[in-house]
Amino acid sequence: MSLIGIDARFYGEAGPGRYTKNIVTHLEQVDKKNHYIVFLTKKNFELYTPKNTNFVKVLADYGWYTFAEQTLFLLKLLKYRLDLLYVPHFNIPIFYPGRLVTAIADVIMHEFSTEEGTTLPKPYYRLKKRIYYLVVLMALLRSKKVIVPTITTKNEIAKYYPRIRKDKFVLAYEALDPDLTLECANSVEVLSKYGIRKPYILYISSMYEHKNVKRLVEAFELLVNNSQFDGELVLVGKKDKYSQEIYDLVSKKGLRDKVLLPGMNERVDDQSTVCLRKEAALYVFPSLKEGFSLTPLESMVHSIPCVISKIPCHEEVYGDSAVYFDPLDVNDIAQKMHIGLTDQKLREDLISRGRVLLGKYSFTETAKITSQVFKDVL
């Protein structure tokens, strides 16, 4: 019996927060032997209630990517004399001296900068970016094992860090968040709230540069003008500089009545996104790079055909269950959206293949692999 710490400070947040929530929940189910301390911030402390008596939550109210993370959080970790620390992200306290396992979802920031969208002073942002590179390197060097969600991510890491031992990496695919598989009883009300009319094409994610949303808008304009598509494009994401740029582009093109950004007015919650997926005619995801790319899978669970970018991650995760386009070719994006909307036989095939694909990914299996990694390291 060992004492394992989990850095769950992201619990309940978007992105790594979903992974953290689900891996903690499912580790409770698969590991009845070891004892766990789950470290949480004040914001998310009440979101998590342990159901396994071997799991105990502890307050660790230190922001991620901060000096406090590297100092005060480190001191708190040392206090508990853990046999192993699991960090389901790359942001380790770099001076932590004990056994360490990390999960690294991607290294997208190595290729795509978020500098244009930051509200930080540029010199400070660039300093933080250098620290990011250092922390990722230290996580790779210090970790006994690194869990990755795809072979694509493993290959990307190897490209930037060729001297890291290949046997350090363990593949554990991600899976659906159960919160996004619920039924929607009030979809008419949700569509009315956001002024959305059917049919519509749906996109749900952030609007960072690598998400390629600008080309999606340009492709949609072609779809409207060349294929006479009479529906809407609904872009769901948080309000920030990137989404503001897309909003400005939509306005400039005179598409405000055809391209809707409901997240610009208020946060679109999980229940509403379930309803939006359920009623969509097509889900489109044009990203240039991903670590696993969950949002098409989250749409397949609601029997929505998906048209996505032809990138290594997508081909690995989705196989023949989606239609692919060249994400750099606006005409190809528009053409594949048109096919996805109008070819009924293809739509039925995609829905059927999507149902089969859903059975491939399970957080229970991810947790079992993670638990085995802990066992091997210990």
Image: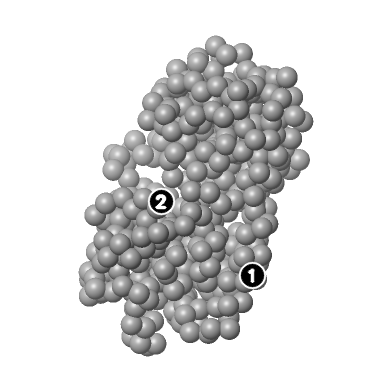
Direction front: furthest residue: 185
Residue 274 screen position, x and y as percent:
43, 58
Give above or below for 110 relative to 58: below
What's the coloring here?
Answer: one colour
Is 340 on the left or on the right of 101, as rendered? left
Question: Dot 2: within a 10 Å radius of its alpha carbon, few (fewer than 14), some, or many (20 or more) residues?
Answer: few
Residue at 50%, 82% (x, y): give it: 339
Judge from the rendering whether residue 302 lies leftward or rightward of residue 225; answer left or right: right
Q: CA distance from mark 2 to mark 1?
A: 25 Å
Q: Amino acid at mark 1?
A: Arg
> Where's residue 254, x and y in %?
22, 75
In screen coordinates, is 212 left or right of 56? Answer: left
- Type of the residue with mark 2: Asp
Tell me which residue sits at (44%, 45%) in the image.
Answer: 14
Tell me if residue 98 can be seen.
no
Q: Which residue is labeled 2 in the image? A: 270
Q: Which residue is mark 1?
A: 353
State whether residue 173 is above or below residue 55: below
- The 10 Å Cα crowd at callout 1, few under 14, some 14 to 19, many 20 or more, is some
Counting residues from the start of the chain, the first of labels 2 and 1 encountered is: 2
- Where 207 falls versus 17 (above or below)? below
Q: Secondary structure at mark 1?
A: helix
